[in-house]
Amino acid sequence: MGLLPRDGAYFVKHLCDLGRQVRAAAITARPSGNALGTQPLSHVARETAADTIYDLDTHIEPVLEEFCQKWGRELPLVLIAEGIVDENGAEGVKCFPHGIQPAEAAFRLIVDPIDGTRGLMYDKRSGWLLAGIAPNNGDTTRLSDIVAAVQVEIPTSKQNKSDVLWAVRGQGAAAQREDLSSGQTTPLALRPSRAVDLAHGFGSVVSFFPGTKLLAAELMETISLHGGGGNDPGRPLVFDDQYISTGGQLYEVMIGHDRFVADVRPYFYHVTHQPAGLCAHAYDLCAMLIAQEAGVIVSNALGQPVDGVLDVTTPVAWAAYANEHLYKRIEPVSVKFFADRGLLPT
């Protein structure tokens, strides 16, 4: 693995600065008095190989470009993010400052400028800036190479506070709550649940979009039955929360709100022989280091660590467990569920 030319604190500071700039731009883009206004933030600007780019996203792209160009003059970098296009028309990767070759970069920066655009553009729920730093190992650089990460909350119009979280590998995670009116900051404790089952708690299998909902419901029913919640509709003990934001979901586990979340859409498409639809990508998980450093167990839901190349198109499946008790209780259920459907050897 390559080495970084600065320590983790240096990168955390820069990523927090980027997050605050993106947050400010998103707030400025919001029409006053109405989340939609005359030019809806939900207007489709364009489609990319990774995902749909909405009008809200287009307000953030120049901020990211300018930030990376300035930082790149200090330390050359490779940016990986959906929606960006390099000088040759290639999507998802761009070098800064302009004109350098990828091999000249000191590090790779992977960013999701707004994770949770769909909820934020309707002013329903916070989005998140997610960013991770890895040594530049070329096109083989992976999620497991990330050594520093930040996520910054982009709040809805009725919020005046925003949470900022960060981590450096091997040094733990930290967070603070920022008052957007006064600028005052207060420490924020990251305390994943210590519950040993799902009873009277939140646990979810992602089913955001049509195409995978039936299998997602079946898997969640199976997990609930064996995860200590039961399946009695007259006495529901497991609660569901479909937060359309990977960073937001990991935040909910870190902060102690949720006990378990799984996004295994790639497996659903595989076992149903459907063309792959929209799934999580590396940029959605580029800040998962924070959850891991906070004590959350993040796996691929099949008993292995989450990993993948740093690009904008490769699907990634993941599951997050608030503690080891929940991991040991739920992960084998997921493994058997997919083994029974031919995804794994029985």
Image (cartoon, rainbow, N blue to C red):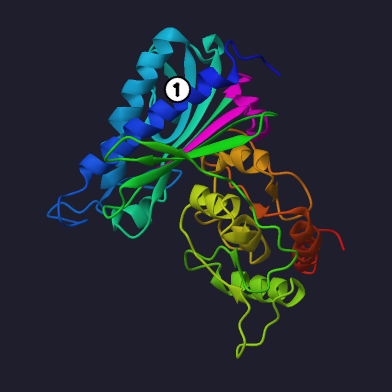
Residue sitting farthest toward the bottom: 234
Out of 134 and 52, give the one closest to the viewer. 134
Residue 250 relative to residue 340: left or right: left
Which one is in front, 181 or 249? 181
Q: Residue 337, image x and y in percent?
A: 76, 68
Q: Residue at x 73, y 54 (%)?
A: 323
Q: Is residue 323 visible?
A: yes
Whether residue 21 appears in magenta in the rendering, the answer is no
136 vs 296: above or below: above
* Residue at image location 55% in from the left, 18% down from the top: 107
Residue 145 magenta-drawn?
yes
The residue under label 1 is: 14
Residue 268: x percent and y percent? Answer: 63, 63
- Residue numbers of the magenta segment: 134-154
Q: Position of residue 246 (x, y in %)?
A: 52, 50
Residue 237, picture quadrant: bottom right
Compared across the picture, whether 67 is left or right of 152 comes to: left
- Residue 45, compared with residue 79, is above or below; it is below
Q: Quadrant of the N terminus?
A: top right
Q: What residue type is labelled 1?
A: His
Above or below for 35 versus 337: above
- In the rendered image, which quarter is residue 345 located in? bottom right
Q: How many marks?
A: 1
Give the class, few, some or many, for how many residues have Cα within 10 Å of label 1's Cα (few <14, many ≥20). some
Q: What element carries label 1?
A: helix
One can see residue 129 in this view: no
Q: Where is residue 143? Give x, y as percent.
A: 63, 34
Is residue 304 shown above or below 113?
below
